[in-house]
Image (cartoon, grey):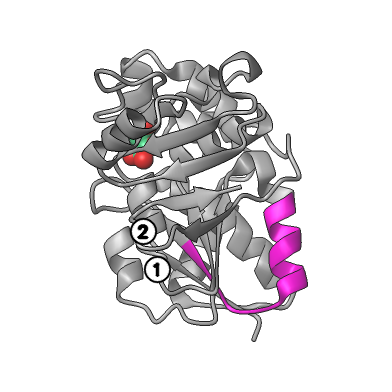
Amino acid sequence: MKYVELSDTPHELSNFDKSGHTCVVIDILRATTTIQAALAAGALSVWACGELETALKLKRDQPDLVLAGERGGIRPKGFDLGNSPLEFIPKLVSGQTVVLTTTNGTRALAACFGAKRVLTGCYLNAGAILKLLVIEGGPCFLACAGHEGTASAEDRLFAGFLASELDSLGFQIGEKARIAAEEWMANLTLPLEDRLFGCPHGQALCQLGFASDVRFAAQWDTSVRVPQFTLAAGQNIWVGI
Ligand code: MLT
């Protein structure tokens, strides 16, 4: 069934029956943009985990892993990289496995447990995500990461873009997805970059010195790759390729 609905937070998503659904995890600033950048730079895979301790233990056990992520937007002590997509350059990640732990994005992945398929989306792979959802033609959830349990404007914007496109392509649109689509359509003349800078999280990243990350996240269709994540057996680690 061609149907799309949206959830604003991992908690909201965990209340839905996701069996038979494709979930598209959306954390524009910055986790899903960073995952896209890491794979584009040649990382073999991205292992996403919600807990800092899990990530540190993986690194202790396998020192070759590239340990990346943030808490409060900042690279935690002992990590190789932060969560800035611009840090993921071929010299540092090509041919490597990246372990990524972030405040909200990796938790949104965990909330997809039980879905038929789990993908990550951002503006960098917008067209490819859309094409894949249309080809699949099945029900899907736009799983926004949000920010510490509340909705994030930049995630809703991207979900709204996808929902409005899917609407015009014959999908049934859930109530929340329809509102997000209207929000997306309401300000189409404003450049995407300005829309992202106008979001509270965009402003917070500027204050932390990451304005270039916001600019990076506002690029359309730099990649046709759609990362797909599966849960590693018996562990709380989502492996994306
Ligand atoms: C998150 O997962 O919470 C974000 O990607 C935070 C950030 O690094 O901006």
- Identify the secondary structure beneath mark 2: helix
Which residue is pictured at 71% across the width and 77% down the height?
Answer: 137
Does residue 98 lie above or below 155 as drawn? Answer: above
Residue bearing mark 2: 110
Structural crowding at the residue carrying mark 1, measured as other residues with C-alpha within 10 Å and reported as few (<14), some (14–19) or many (≥20): some
Give, as a single range, the part of the protein colored magenta: 128-142
- Identify the secondary structure beneath mark 1: loop
Q: Is residue 13 visible?
A: yes
Residue type beneath disc 1: Phe
In which quadrant will I find the N terminus? bottom right
Does residue 156 lie above or below 221 as drawn? Answer: below
Main secondary-structure element of the magenta-colored stretch: helix
Q: Quadrant of ligand 1?
A: top left
Does residue 67 lie above or below 103 as drawn? Answer: above
Residue 113 circle label: 1
Using residue 234 as the reference point, say whether residue 217 is left or right of it.
Answer: right
Q: Please name whichever residue, 239 or 114, is drawn nearer the observer in this view of the structure.
A: 239
Does the beta carbon at disc 2 come under 8 Å from ligand 1? no
Structural crowding at the residue carrying mark 2, measured as other residues with C-alpha within 10 Å and reported as few (<14), some (14–19) or many (≥20): many
Residue 220 circle label: none
Horizontal and vertical percent for residue 152? Answer: 36, 47
Contact? badges 1 and 2 (CB < 8 Å): yes
The quarter holding residue 199 reads: top left
Q: Label 1 vs label 2: CA separation?
A: 6 Å
Residue type beneath disc 2: Ala
Which residue is pictured at 50% across the width and 50% down the height?
Answer: 239
